[in-house]
Image: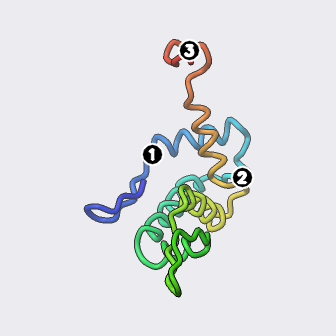
Amino acid sequence: RYTSRPVPTVELFTDTLALADELIDLLGWRHWYPAGSVRAAAIAHEAVHEQLHHGPRKKDLKRALDHVVLRAGRHTLYGHVAGADEIAAHAHARTVCGLGRSPLLLTAALATAAEPQHGSPHGREK
């Protein structure tokens, strides 16, 4: 998790990293996510959030997405695209860590593994 206040900080949840490594082994995905890559990918991912929060990268991403909210003469106001920074952070982590698949796949697998099983006494019926 990246927080910008009071000072820019990246916080890693070691229990989540351990669970991710267990799930990778369980699913047979180690060839996509080598040992040590989950931690490295998490740091690379959060580094992108820091870059997009401060400095010119935020403006660069908005321009690249070309979501124009207002144009008045030579002035253009680019809008925020929800989730774009998250996709960029996952893509960056995959690239710099040389992963076989996006960390987004692992995130989805972790979320699915954490869901209560159907009929579980802890899950809510819909």
* Residue 5, label in figure: none
Q: Secondary structure at mark 3?
A: loop
Q: How many dots with numbers?
A: 3
Residue located at (61% from left, 72% from top): 66
Whichever of labels 1 and 2 marks the residue nearer the N terminus, that label is 1
Query: From mark 3 to mark 1, how far is it between C-alphas?
Result: 27 Å
Judged left or right of residue 7, residue 75 is right
Residue located at (62% from left, 18% from top): 118
Disc 2 marks which amino acid? Trp
Can you tell which quarter of the image residue 108 is in?
Answer: top right
Query: From mark 1 to mark 2, how far is it between C-alphas?
Result: 20 Å
Residue 88 image position (x, y, % from top left): 59, 63
Q: Above or below — where is 24 with respect to 3?
A: above
Q: Secondary structure at mark 2?
A: loop
Between 116 and 61, the one lying in front of the other is: 61
Disc 1 marks which amino acid? Thr
Q: Secondary structure at mark 1?
A: helix
Residue that lies at the very extreme toward the left in this rendered image: 6
Q: Which residue is mark 3?
A: 120
Q: Nearer the viewer, mark 2 or mark 3?
A: 3
Residue 89 image position (x, y, % from top left): 56, 62
Whichever of labels 2 and 3 marks the residue nearer the N terminus, that label is 2
* Residue 14, label in figure: 1
Residue located at (59% from left, 68% from top): 67
Q: For the residue carrying disc 1, how many other residues have a C-alpha within 10 Å: few (<14), some (14-19), or many (20+)? A: few
Residue 123 image position (x, y, % from top left): 52, 19
Q: Which residue is mark 2?
A: 32
Residue located at (43% from left, 51% from top): 12
